[in-house]
Amino acid sequence: MLKIAGIIIIMISTTLYGYRMSLDLKAEYNELLEIKKMMFLLKGEIAYGSCTINEALANISTRCGMNIDNILENIASDTEGNFYENWEQKWNDGFLNMHLSKNIKADILNFKDVLGLADKSGELSQIDLFLSRLQNEIDNTGNILPQKCRMYRCLAVGAGIILSIIII
């Protein structure tokens, strides 16, 4: 009786773990899309708005979601201190709740070097460069998303079955 209860608990926990891994991958994909949206909005604010970078970030924060709105609001509202240090600190704090890859995190942190240092056309070209790299990452993640989600779920169930056989 105790073995049966253990097997049931193992099967449930490994299956849920595989499902959680696939949800994390889907969350990463959605966060990439949201960052792309943020960059397009920032590009529009820089191109057509005549405001400071903090005002631009405050304007686009109301139209973003998935923790990005909070990060941008925190950066825009913190007028004390250095903008570039605030950018890095707020994004590092926000990354704790995000599922992004290390490359994208590094690109976002390095993006602060572009903001406010070049003229309008230079900033827009750097945003376009960032968007092209981001689109490549979105395409790669989107292509492997269904296969990896299925693989995570199957491996988790398989691991549960193997552990159950070992218990028996």
Image (spheres, helix red, strand yellow):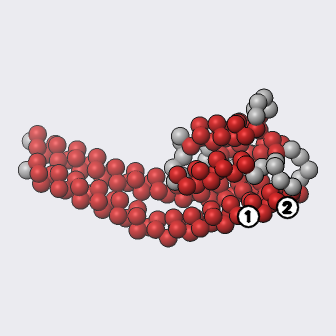
Q: Secondary structure at mark 2?
A: helix
Of residues 163 and 135, the one drawn nearer to the viewer in this rendering: 135
**Left or right, residue 47 beside residue 33:** right
Q: Residue at x 19, y 56 (%)?
A: 161
For badge 2, the amino acid type reads Ser
Along the viewing direction, whichever of 90 and 97 lies nearer the viewer: 90
Q: Which residue is mark 1?
A: 128
Residue 133 rendering spot, x and y as whole percentages: 63, 64
Residue placed under numbered mark 2 in the picture = 121
Mark 2 closeness class: few <14, some 14–19, many ≥20 residues within 10 Å: few
In the displayed structure, does residue 133 sit left or right of residue 99?
right
Nearer-N-terminus badge (2/1): 2
Query: Residue type at mark 1?
Result: Asp
Relative image position of residue 19 (x, y in whole percent): 38, 54
Residue 67, label in figure: none
Q: Nearer the viewer, residue 32 or 104?
A: 104
Q: Quadrant of the N terminus?
A: top left
Left or right: where does residue 70 sit relative to residue 16? Answer: right
Residue at position x 76%, y 34% in the image: 82
Q: Position of residue 132 (x, y in %)?
A: 66, 66
Q: Which residue appears at 57% of the width and 64% of the height?
A: 137
Outermost residue to the right: 50
Q: Judge by depth and name the residue closer to the eye, 129 or 40.
A: 129
Specify whether 56 is left or right of 25.
Answer: right
Residue 161 at least partly seen: yes
Which of the 4 image quadrants contains residue 149? bottom left
- Element class at badge 1: helix
